[in-house]
Amino acid sequence: MARFAAGKAPFLRAAHDKDYGTKVMMKDFLIALLPVILYAWYKNGIRVYMDGNITFLEMLYPLIFIMLGGIISSLMEGIFFFVTDKEHRTLKDISQKLSLSFAAIPGLILALLLPLYTPVWVLIFAAFVATIIGKMIFGGFGHNIFNPALLGYAVVGFTLMGVINNAGGLFNASEVLIDSYAGATPLGALAANKQIDYNILVKPYGDLWTFFIGNYPGALGETGTLAIFFGGLYLVIRKVIKWYTPVIYVGTVFVLSWIIGVISGDGGLWFPAYSVMTGGVMFAAVFMITEPVTTPTNILGKVFFALFLGVLTVLFRFVGSLPEGVGTSLIFMNIFTLPIDKFTGVIRTKRFQKPGGLYFGILSGLVILLALYTLLKAGNMYTAFIPFLGWVI
Amino acid sequence: MIFQKVKGIFIDGRKDMCKKNPLTEYLSPKKVYIPLIQRSSILKAEVKVGDYVKLGQLVASIDKPFTIRVHASVSGNVTAIKKVWHGSGKMVDAVEIENDFKNELADTIKEEKNIDKLTREQLIEKMELAGLTGLGGAGFPTHVKYKTKLKIDAVIINAVECEPYLTCDYHFITNYAEKLLKGASYMARAAGATKAYVAYKINYREIRESMEPFLKDYPNVEVFPVKNVYPSGWEKFVVEQVTKKTYKNLPAEAGVIVNNSATAIIYADIVEKNIPQIVRPVVVTGEGVKVPHAFVVPIGTKVSDLIEICGGYIDGLDPLKYNYIAGGPMTGKAILIDDLVVSDTLGSVVIKPIVEGLYPECLGCGKCADVCPAYLTPTEIKKAFERKDLKLLGDLNANKCVECGLCSYICPSHVEITEAVGKGKAYLLKGGK
């Protein structure tokens, strides 16, 4: 007689396969970021160098800056592990923990969310907020409530935006020289003018094609719609993310913006297209609202999450005081990930029986109400007067 | 709902390691140990130490909640009542019978003369007297299913065997194809049904081919292919595929009764020769066995005897690096000591190397919810159980979990999610105790 090993059913696991598992998913995530990083480097480094506005070393700076984000956040998590766990302080233990914690990803995304000329100490501060406060204090990978990178970006955005602007802000060395960039970012122009006019919003930057390629002022990663699209396509093909989360989110922003355009008297499709290609909507759609830890787990939850997020993005963008609205709405929705998960879980099992139907009604009712409110509020802002809407608000 | 399309996933069967070896009949072990437990009911022994028992003689029984009768699978003297390892992972009492190799038959075993005149009640009574239970692994007493008051249109013989590694039904059917068809038609009569379906996995052409020569003699039996996915052999999934109808609790609500193929083959003998349920097919397979084999053995045989026939474990096997699994690799239990006894619920023993690795935490990807064949949300059930939220567990239908193991299988972070959902289910069924 012999004593055999203990174990739990099922004894077959897909994760035993080297080509499947969370590590592979995270590796795919990094690969998907590659086109975005490369485009950011091209736009802010190579292109400016070819224009003759910077030196060769300065050309490498965008790439170094992005890499720095990943390295700093990895280092910070390493130090965190070293400080908190007294018994496992060898290099092997810490590198093992880091490999299970995927420390570099929040750092890379954080760097992509920031403008090029962000001082490095601001990046370090943001990385600290992202990894230590946003992730490790909650219990590490898998336990964080807020998207770490976004939390770091939000804190810096609220407190240190002046510092970033003084250091150079959103313009790279070439863009500074272009006179027509009046309101910094395209969405800044929208917020400043409060007017849906092709000549003000799109003309100064070129045409919609410019926006699709991403050659306009903005944070490092958010502008290159085409590059982001390729990254998203790769993630969908590799089954890391579900295609409908980004599609529903972008679709909601698109449709609501279009309706707002129609209310304001310009029904052209250029405006919704402009809306989804600016302010990081695409970047968030592919890399942030699909981030599994801080977004709902089940399919129905993801759908509702994307719907709410789309409506809130438009609401914050047109009604709130901040121009872009993506980050604010995502941080706001991160709070509701757990309840959405719970309610949609019940809807999945109970369908329209009690209490599934009730939950479904509440969730979809909320989305519709929010959307209506957004439209009324935004419409009120952009049109001088619409009689039948006027008395509602 | 539109987002509930996925029904099972393809899992590499790895059945070839056992498929090529023929079925071995091993009917006379030196000693058998008849476990005094059936599902969760403790049975009352009807024999004492020192008694002589004939083959097929009643050994133990119980009346409540259902009538269960267990018979001697060899003839000989009862030498002891002692504890043995049971497939459920526990040690249970068992009646040890030393085989005298005379195969003296009990008086009840005789040829049935007027098979065609047997009424429905008589056919069901035979099941009860023979102690026929579901041999697919659940071990539910068959006669209880047939005593339903609902109208039964068809009997479905489940020959799907969707678990990887296992070839127990495959071997038993291909060897006893005609008996299966006989058993199926008797079962249809016992249910008052007009039709019997034999559901098999579509990639097992051999099963269909073995039955084809006899099919014309059994016009009410039809062979029905089901999808090559896991868990295609789940009762509800089989019923949905065959009848296109579904049910809430019991298949009888959809007008069908589902039985395992091995049960049907044994039932053919019960009807024709009155031999009670004393044998069953068992497969011993896995990477840890030299020559994997499928067997027909008396209930109570020691698995160690069978492993010996398989040539033993592979050379240099380190037991602590292998799992000894009672049941299939998806739903079975790891047994720590390799001293297992074949019971009516044990269809297989798999010896499989363990895979060690470091995995990150649950990242909330939702793959477990996507693959769940019962459309549950495993992550939420796990959370609700950790909070001991009984109402939420009920709202999430935790009791509907079939513990198929797919959620743990698909999990990229190797989370023991099936176990957690199983605990939530047990907590809910016990009403929060």
Image: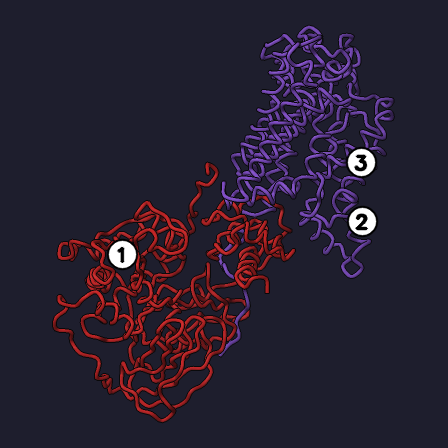
> Mark 3 vs mark 2: same chain?
yes
Residue kind at label 2, given as amino acid type? Ile
Q: Which residue is mark 2?
A: A79
Q: Which residue is mark 3?
A: A126
Q: Depth check: A262 or A208 in front?
A: A262
Rendered hue of chain A is: purple
Q: Nearer the viewer, mark 3 or mark 1?
A: 1
Q: Residue shown at 45%/68% (left/top)? A: B326
Residue kind at label 1, given as amino acid type? Val
Q: Depth check: B46 or A356 in front?
A: A356
SS type, badge 3 = helix
Left or right position of B50 against B428? left
Q: Nearer the viewer, mark 1 or mark 2?
A: 1
Q: Residue shown at 61%/25% (left/top)? A: A227
Left or right position of A2 against A114? left
Q: Depth check: A99 or B54 in front?
A: B54
Q: Chain of mark 3?
A: A
Left or right position of A269 against B375? right
> Mark 3 vs mark 1: same chain?
no
Q: Which mark is residue B155?
A: 1
> Mark 1 vs mark 2: same chain?
no
Outermost bottom residue? B50
Residue kind at label 3, given as amino acid type? Ala
Q: Would you place residue B38 above or below residue B166 in this image? A: below
